[in-house]
Image: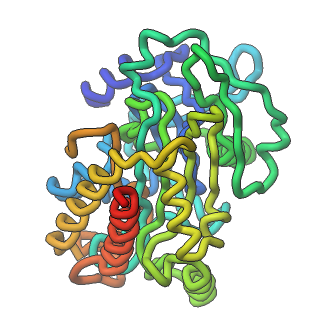
């Protein structure tokens, strides 16, 4: 284990007997099917997919500010604590054996939903964040966090848009549960439990937690690009993914909504939208969803539009200059995430090599910039 990773486990992780770190659900995951877990306040982890791991290790320096920081690899075990509760525990990785490599999670769950190609037409996710509560403002007012109770069965239903009420008053709102992250966590635990007799060690990659600076982060997960299938997809899978794109805004504008959580400060509610809702949105519906993301129920947060647009234009310029086959002001962040199906000319094992820019991603980025620019223009009328 590297000294940097050892220091990270000691400083950021929740200790567990045996020099391990207990992993918890990452409550701000609003999209995707891969389980994202909280390693510590500033670090998350997710199952290691070799292609995504290779992407982070070979990422060009000029692109790193547009992605979460890569922080290493850990070994994760499925264990029971003293009370019999099932836990996921991260330990330092002592072996580089290929036996710990994880297969593509889409092979035993739902279809691939996160794709990026820096040099052609696959899709990726774009994460936008803003904050309705500053941590600095909240720190002196923090008391024991509370959340109104709700029926757990409600989380199991396939509702596409949900509202949860958070305690108001002097108590700073805290998110304890997110319907999508809880669903992914439970599914992953179940798969690991079923495989426990045959295997109980998995590699996970550690990544920067982009939400850690925010008390109640508003998160928008967008799938970028006009193509969803990989080069190695079967004809049946390819047809299915093409049809899915054609039936959503992916085909028309190169971007669609995968998930969203927004804190509505007036009512004290968190509003969630999932990917099933996002697939059904028309262009007008997608624009309305973006409006909702930047609206806190009282007003459109105009001060966020300019820094988000600046960040998106920086990303577009970097992508257009990238032939691979920090904005100041209000608290916002824009990053690309999820690279499990990336490809570039340096991937020697790929049968198909793409040249030039990722035109589908850039197409979606241009349309996203246009739509948010329209919001900015109309907000000044």
Q: Residue furthest front?
A: 381
Q: Which residue sits at x=21%, y=57%? A: 63
The answer to whether residue 376 is left or right of residue 13 is left
Q: Specify the quadrant of the image occupied by residue 86.
A: top right
Q: Give above or below for 186 relative to 233.
A: above
Q: Give above or below for 274 relative to 131.
A: below
Q: Nearer the viewer, residue 88 or 238?
A: 238
Q: Residue 175's x, y, as percent?
A: 60, 30
Q: Which residue sits at x=73%, y=45%? A: 190
The answer to whether residue 126 is left or right of residue 112 is left
The colour scheme of the drawn protein is rainbow
Q: Which residue sits at x=23%, y=49%? A: 65
| Residue 192 in sight from this viewpoint | no
Q: Nearer the viewer, residue 152 or 79?
A: 152
Quadrant in which the C terminus is drawn: bottom left
Quadrant in which the N terminus is drawn: top left
Label count reads 0
Q: Residue 184's x, y, as percent?
A: 65, 48
Q: Nearer the viewer, residue 255 or 69?
A: 255
Q: Give above or below for 257 relative to 232.
A: above
Q: Residue 230's x, y, as percent?
A: 46, 77
Q: Which residue sits at x=17%, y=74%? A: 323
The answer to whether residue 184 is left or right of residue 218 is right
């Amino acid at each position: 284990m590297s000294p940097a990773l050892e220091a990270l486990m000691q400083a950021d992780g929740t200790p567990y007997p045996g020099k391990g770190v207990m992993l918890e659900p990452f409550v701000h995951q609003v999209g995707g099917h891969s389980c994202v877990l909280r390693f510590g306040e500033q670090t998350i982890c997710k199952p290691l997919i070799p292609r995504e791991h290779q992407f982070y290790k070979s990422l060009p320096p000029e692109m790193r500010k547009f992605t979460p920081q890569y922080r290493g690899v850990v070994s994760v075990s499925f264990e029971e604590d003293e009370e019999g509760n099932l836990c996921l525990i991260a330990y330092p990785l002592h072996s580089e054996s290929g036996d710990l490599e994880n297969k593509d999670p889409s092979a035993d769950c739902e279809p691939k939903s996160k794709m990026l190609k820096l040099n052609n037409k696959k899709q990726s996710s774009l994460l936008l964040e803003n904050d309705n509560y500053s941590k600095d403002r909240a720190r002196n007012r923090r008391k024991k966090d509370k959340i109104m109770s709700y029926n757990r069965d409600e989380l199991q239903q396939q509702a596409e848009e949900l509202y949860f009420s958070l305690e108001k008053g002097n108590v700073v709102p805290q998110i304890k549960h997110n319907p999508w992250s809880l669903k992914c966590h439970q599914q992953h635990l179940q798969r690991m439990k079923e495989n426990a007799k045959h295997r109980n060690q998995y590699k996970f990659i550690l990544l920067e937690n982009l939400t850690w600076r925010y008390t109640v982060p508003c998160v928008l997960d967008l799938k970028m690009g006009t193509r969803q299938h990989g080069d190695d997809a079967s004809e049946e899978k390819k047809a299915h993914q093409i049809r899915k794109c054609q039936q959503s805004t992916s085909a028309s504008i190169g971007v669609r909504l995968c998930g969203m959580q927004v804190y509505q400060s007036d009512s004290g509610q968190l509003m969630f939208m999932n990917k099933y809702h996002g697939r059904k949105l028309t262009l007008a519906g997608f624009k309305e969803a973006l409006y909702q993301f930047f609206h806190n129920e009282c007003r459109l947060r105009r001060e966020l539009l300019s820094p988000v647009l600046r960040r998106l234009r920086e990303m577009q310029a970097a992508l257009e200059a990238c032939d691979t086959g920090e904005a100041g002001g209000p608290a916002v962040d824009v990053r690309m995430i999820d690279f499990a199906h990336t490809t570039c000319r340096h991937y020697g094992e790929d049968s198909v090599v793409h040249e030039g820019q990722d035109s589908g991603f850039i197409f979606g980025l241009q349309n996203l910039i246009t739509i948010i620019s329209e919001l900015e223009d109309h907000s000044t009328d």
